[in-house]
Amino acid sequence: MPTASLTRPLKVLLICCLLVSAWAFLAPMLWMLSTSLKPLNETMTLPPVWIPSEIQWRNYPDAIAAMGHFWRYAGNSLFLAIMTVIGTVTSSALAAYGFSRIEWKGRDKVFVILLATMMIPFPVVMVPLYSLFKSLGWIGTFKPLWVPAFLAGAFSVFLLRQFFLTLPKDMAEAARIDGCNELQIFWHIILPLSKPALLVVAIFQFMATWNDFLGPLIYLTEQKDFTLALGLQSFQSQQGGTAWHQLMAASTLVVLPVIVLFFFTQRTFIEGIAATGSKN
Amino acid sequence: MTRREKENLRTGLLFISPWIAGFLLLSVYPLVATLYYSLSDYSVLSPAVFVGLENYRNLATDPIFWKSVYNTFFFAAFALPLGLLVSLTLAVLLNFDLPGRGIFRTVFFLPSLMPMVCLAVLWQWMLNGDLGLINNVLRPPLDAVNALFGTNLTPPNWLQEPVYAKWGIIFTALWGVGQAVVIYLAGLQDVPRHLYESAEIDGANFWKKTWHITLPMISPVIYFNLIMGLIGSFQVFAVPYVMTEGGDGPERSLLFMATYLYQNAFDYWSMGYACAIGLVLFLVILGLTLLATGLSARHVHYEGN
Amino acid sequence: MPRSSCNTKRLARLCGAALAALLATGCDGRPNNPDGRVVVRYWDKWSGSEAKAMQEVVDDFNAGQDRIRVEYSSVSQINRKLMLAIGGGNPPDVAGLFGNTLAVYAENNALTPLDKLAAENGVSRDDYIGVFWDICNHRGRLWGLPSAPASLALVWNKKLFREAGLDPDRPPQSIAELEEYNDKLASRDENGRLVGAGLLPSEPGWWPAIWGWWFGGDLWDGERITADSPENIAAMEWIASYPERFGARDLLSFRDGFGNFASPQNAFFTGRVAMVLQGPWIQNFIRDFAPPDFEWGAAPFPSSGPDDEGVTLVETDVLVIPAGAKHPREAFDFIRYVNTQGPMEKLCIAQCKFSPLKEHSPDFLQRHPNPQIGTFLELAKSSHARFVPPLTFWVMYENDMKQAFGKVWTGAASPREALAEVQSRLQAEFERRRARWDRVAAALQEGWNKQP
């Protein structure tokens, strides 16, 4: 909204509002960081202190040791994230191309079905999926967590389709006249133009896998196969809530990769999120 | 169909074939299977035995199931509108041309990056009755009130008291509204400037502009966010599960439909019963989405329509 | 350039190949026995020093023969994880469960019955303190053998008793006396915040369902759930007296400041509570977390009347062979090994528990790190030792009782109301489960007859 009409006091007031809200959003994260660097007894003092009397970096290696297989968890999370990103990007791009750049009978009706599947919550289908993967012998392996990513998630297809629709038609037409087939057009023309959208889908998938809890909870059985999210929960349930300094250190370590990813891809990230809402 | 049409159909279907496979295996089959299992006595290890509507009859008289329904609706009924209010307000604030907008936007957005498990662990600590940050912020003003009026107000033990536990979860959810802020902000920035300018000529004030221009123009975005939020809040699971260490909170105040489904499936070995809960959950979400869509047909304004 | 249809074929081939690759990776086996031994995978719930104790027994077993190699791993929340693994068809060969979950595992056909293996190996009830063998049996079959057992006693902090003017060597003998002690041991700071207490049934609150036992009650009678029996209501009324006396919110706030059980902030070790209901393992935690001058004693938990003196809960961890285990015989060899005197005493001494075997070595009690182990052992051997009902929905029962406890503890419901709710829900559940059992019993029993 244009601000020419804003008077100076009003402007100050609005900034104050923003500052207060920003503090409310920032404080818990700072609190997490602060707790993660405190000696244990200082997490128990009342009223609490923000700046630890001595910065105790040791909490981080201690938390890593206490979690048991921290580096394995991290490796597992990374493996799953990479596999699901590859799977989602390739399969969803193909499907999105089929939903946007090729005219075929009934296409838009099928697309509505695709949109409708976004409404099915995972808990509803989790029991049959569990028994399906059981019959494949996949329980206790990583497969239930990454193989489905190769079968094109509805949300990613939706995002990519919206993007593909905005690409100009003439280049593809010209290529078609030159005798290119659809796969070549997809590969040589559409994909290079869609790098930002593909990156958005990749980032979303990475986050979704990194954050996933219920999937690993039911499919993974051996401690050493846990993901970071599951490992953190397991650590917390063993701790039962005392070693808050270590729990906060462990949480910080689990969030850190996501935050780093965010800062490196901030623009794409924010634009991608914005696009999810506005382009329908 | 012409030859070309046929070919297009074949190519199109081939391109979407990964999705078709996923649709059949990961959506259609599980939904049908859920329906079948919900009519059976089933525990994974022994084959399903058909029992008719028994699971549904038991559901109808199971007070704990109804408690989980109540809790789920309670959570959605507060978390959704409050989330809408908070995120829309913040987006409107950010939409003013003020210094530091980019930084503020990042600050609001950051918490939504937190994995659910971290979110739960952090807020379990924030809401700790004795040492948590929230209560330490609340204590001084409450003490001031106590000193003034001779009352004896103390902050609650959020996650230990049934009345407050759900509010703890709601606050946790509100803290993560950053994505919605970004989406609304983008929506607000897409509203054509000239609409405001001509309204200003007519002498419209801020509230009039908000009511008559901003809200109608971003109503599709609101609708989208609302549907997504609805689907999300009806399957709330990870945060209460982690906060209660796999339990359901004081007096089951943190037992949600997804939690009860999980407990029945993987703690009590009653997978048929779990599937019945799943189907009810699905129908609830379906019904509410259709309801929202019906309402939105009247109130959502699409450009060009 | 090739025509479009050609390329659709290529696309199809590509998709097909990708799918085939995915499915191919679906049937990889685990790397197995490089040295020709049968690998027995063994999961248990223990972590830390308890896991280390078991690992040593496993190492001894592996070193003592060259046919089998047991691979131990610690699994948190083993009840859930083991079920997922058995259900998923990929279970370990041996698992350590809590004895009170045997019923649900057995009736869901998730375990291998061990009667024949036990008979072949000459293992019988005569070898054990009877009650532990009974825990391992359900529906007429043997489902596991005990590993580390325990009984519960009142454990108290002598220093706090002395400071409160109580005889440090004389624990309360009855519930009435316990309440007197509670009043003497409670303390508040200058702001009125509760900072010390005698016994809090909520700390650590691991057995919310069984308080009625010390009031002469029980949880079922074989035919009916008895959650709302007068004795159980009396116990709940005793629970309800806490919030009345100390204030519900004060108690909650007090408890929120307690640390985790296994930490120096444990409320008992920091002197915030003076008495707890605990098992013999408490010694290990005292050694690791309590201040060096911590003085404590153990005695039978006080009861409401003389008939219930010496009542205790006995429980035991059990070693089971999940259904679908690949090497049940080798698994049993290992379980059998753990259940011989030497290894069992090694394990129990390290975990600070007593042996479930009838005979212990002459110097067992002297070698034992827990000075009070004799008290716990005598409690387990007494005729008042009980275990929780072998119901398939015990988890649900305990959870409901915990909920009822919570309501009474916060003053949200009267004991009668809270227990009536538990009673009606669980009696219905009991009948449903019985109907289910009647439906499947014949088929299950027939399957179990074909045990290895």
Image (cartoon, rainbow, N blue to C red):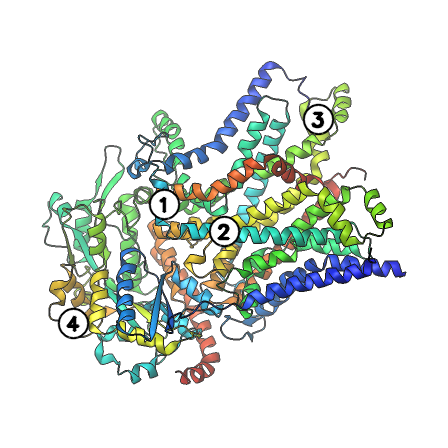
Identify the element where label 4 is drawn.
loop
Observer-nearest of A137 and B180: A137
B8 or B223: nearer the viewer: B8
Is residue C165 depicted above or below A271 in this figure?
below
Q: Which residue is mark 2?
A: A77
Q: Quadrant of the C terminus of chain A?
A: top right
Q: Which mark is residue A63?
A: 1
Residue at the spot x=64%, y=40% of the render?
A272
- Is there one chain holding both mark 3 and mark 1? no
How far apart are labels 3 and 2 at the CA level?
Answer: 48 Å
C10 in relation to B224, above or below: below
Farthest residue in the top direction? A8
Q: Nearer the viewer, mark 3 or mark 4?
A: 4
Q: Amino acid at mark 1?
A: Ala
Q: Tell me the number on the disc at residue C360.
A: 4
- From the top left corner, tell me how far across and down residue A27 is, in percent: 45, 32
Query: Which chain is mark 3 on?
Result: B
Q: Is there one chain holding both mark 1 and mark 4? A: no
Measured as percent of width and height from the top left, residue B197 is found at 75, 22
Please tell me how crowded label 1 is: few (under 14), some (14-19), or many (20+) other residues with Cα within 10 Å: many
Label 3 sits on a secondary structure element that is helix
Under mark 2, the amino acid is: Ser
- Judging depth in this view, the residue of C32 and C103 nearest the camera is C32
Identity, as a three-letter code, of the amino acid under mark 4: His
As measured in the structure, the alpha-carbon distance from the residue carrying label 4 to the one carrying label 2 is: 48 Å
Q: Which residue is mark 3?
A: B209
Same chain under badges 3 and 2? The reply is no
Question: How many residues crowd mark 2 within 10 Å: few (<14), some (14–19), many (20+)?
Answer: many
Circle 1 chain: A
Q: Amino acid at mark 3?
A: Lys
Q: How far is mark 1 from mark 4, CA to CA?
A: 40 Å
